[in-house]
Structure formats: structure tokens, C-alpha cells
Image (tube, grey):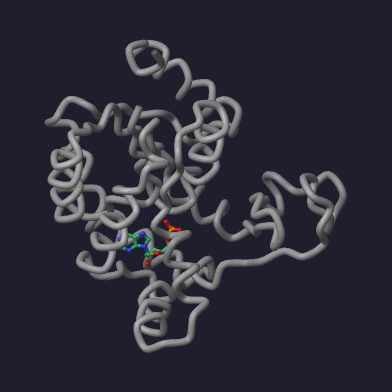
Amino acid sequence: MNIILLGPPGAGKGTQAQLLQEKFGLIKLSTGDMLREVIKQDNPLSKRIKDIMNAGQLVPDDVIIAMIADRIVQGDIQNGFILDGFPRTVAQAEALDVMLRRLDKKLDAVIELQVDDAALIQRIAGRFTCAKCNVGYNKTLNPPAQEGVCDQCGSTEFTFRDDDKAETVASRLKTYHAQTAPLLPYYQEKGILVSVDGMKEVDEVWHAINELLQSQSNLLT
Ligand code: AMP
């Protein structure tokens, strides 16, 4: 089963992708995570990428498409993948179609997580991640059981994303509406777009995604 999770920043794509990975053994491919690895390096390209990310803009299509093209040919995606944060432009979606055709694969579903902008801003403003095991939290909506200690691994170190600052978030949302939202009609036309109410709690959204995949039960066999 090959799935795209589509939605604005803060909609919960990463969280749901993680759950899909655990339950169905799919491989999560997150271009945001890949880019965050790239910008740890110190070279002119990584510096340019970091500036683009911190401005809330999109990294050029050719860079992103090359990154996914390299990743998608690796053997571990044979049982299926979840794309989180890719594609983000129609040009990326078209390039993905070409890649999949060459690999004799197809997309089974594009799941849109619908969340309104005000809720996104609140979610993003409070989010942080365990520096050791990468589990995500939110200061008000989903804090660790014991303040300052990761539920999963006990680490006391957390990281905050540079691009989660309020001014960058506004720009990321604008970018989403201008450049990524046109993917909704693109996939609607292909008959593979399904939408889920992403305003609900994580468990409820997860439940809705499961129901949806069950209803298309050929995806789960
Ligand atoms: P994310 O973790 O998916 O929110 O991505 C963080 C940032 O990485 C985005 O705001 C973009 O600057 C960049 N990025 C991630 N995925 C893409 C993509 N598919 N195309 C262009 N830029 C991307």
C-alpha cells in the first residue's frame, strides 16, 4: 500500500505517518526529516536550504525530486510507503507519477488531513521533539506525563524546530495554500483523494484513517 499524507504544516502528518509505519510496516518517507539531516552539514547547499526552510518557503523542486528519486528505488519500500511532506507542488506530483510508473508502482490513496489555520498556529507554537528518540510532544495539547522527561525513552533533552517560530509559521501556511493546496484537485481528479477531519484528537484521526483504509479493504490485503 502506497499512501500520501497531505495537509498543511502542523496537521499531524508526521504523527499519523509514524502510526501507519508501526501498524502496517510501511516505510515513512519525510522530505522535511531528510532536509533536517542535510542542514546539519556545513556546506553551501545546506546553508541555502536552511535559509529557505527558515523563511517558510519551499526548497526547489529539482533538489527535492532528486532526493526522493534516490530514496524510492531502495529495496525497503517494496512493502509500501507513506509520503509525508512530499509532493508539495504539482511539478513534484508529476515527477512522482513518472517515478512510480517506471517502478511499476501506483499510489493507493492520498489522505488529506483537514485542519483550520488558527488551530495549526496553536499546535505548531507548542510543539517540541525528544532529542534522543524523536517522539513529538506539544506543550498544551500533548505534554509528556512528567514535565521535562520523555515518556518513551526518559531523555530530558528536547529540540524545537527553527521554522516553528510564529513569523515562519505564517509564511509556511501561505506557501501551503498557494503551492500545495492545488494538489487536492490534482489527486481528486485521479479519484484517489480522501479527506479526514484533522481537528480531532490523534486517536480519533487515527481511527478515521483506519476505517478509511478498511473500507478500501483491498489496500489491507
Ligand atoms: P516539514 O517537516 O514537512 O514541515 O518540512 C519543513 C520544511 O522543509 C518546509 O517548510 C520546506 O521548507 C521544506 N520542505 C519539506 N518538504 C518539501 C518539499 N516536498 N518541497 C519543498 N520543500 C520542502
Q: Quadrant of the N terminus?
A: top left
Question: In percent of the image, x 83 and y 44: which residue is there?
Answer: 145
Question: In percent of the image, x 40 and y 72: which residue is there?
Answer: 53
Q: Is residue 14 above or below residue 111?
A: below
Q: What x and y, as percent, mark residue 205?
A: 52, 28
Question: In percent of the image, x 79 and y 52: which residue is there?
Answer: 150
Residue 115 falls left or right of residue 73: right
Q: Quadrant of ligand 1?
A: bottom left
Q: Quadrant of residue 172?
A: bottom left
Residue 151 falls left or right of residue 175: right
For this orientation, the residue located farthest to the front is 75
Q: What x and y, as percent, mark residue 36?
A: 48, 67
Residue toward you, 68 or 170: 68
Q: Quadrant of the C terminus?
A: top left
Residue toward you, 10 or 64: 64
Q: Is residue 210 above or below residue 187?
A: above
Q: What x and y, as percent, mark residue 168?
A: 45, 71
Q: Quadrant of residue 113?
A: top left
Question: In percent of the image, x 20 and y 40: which residue is there?
Answer: 103
Q: Is residue 109 above or below residue 82?
A: above
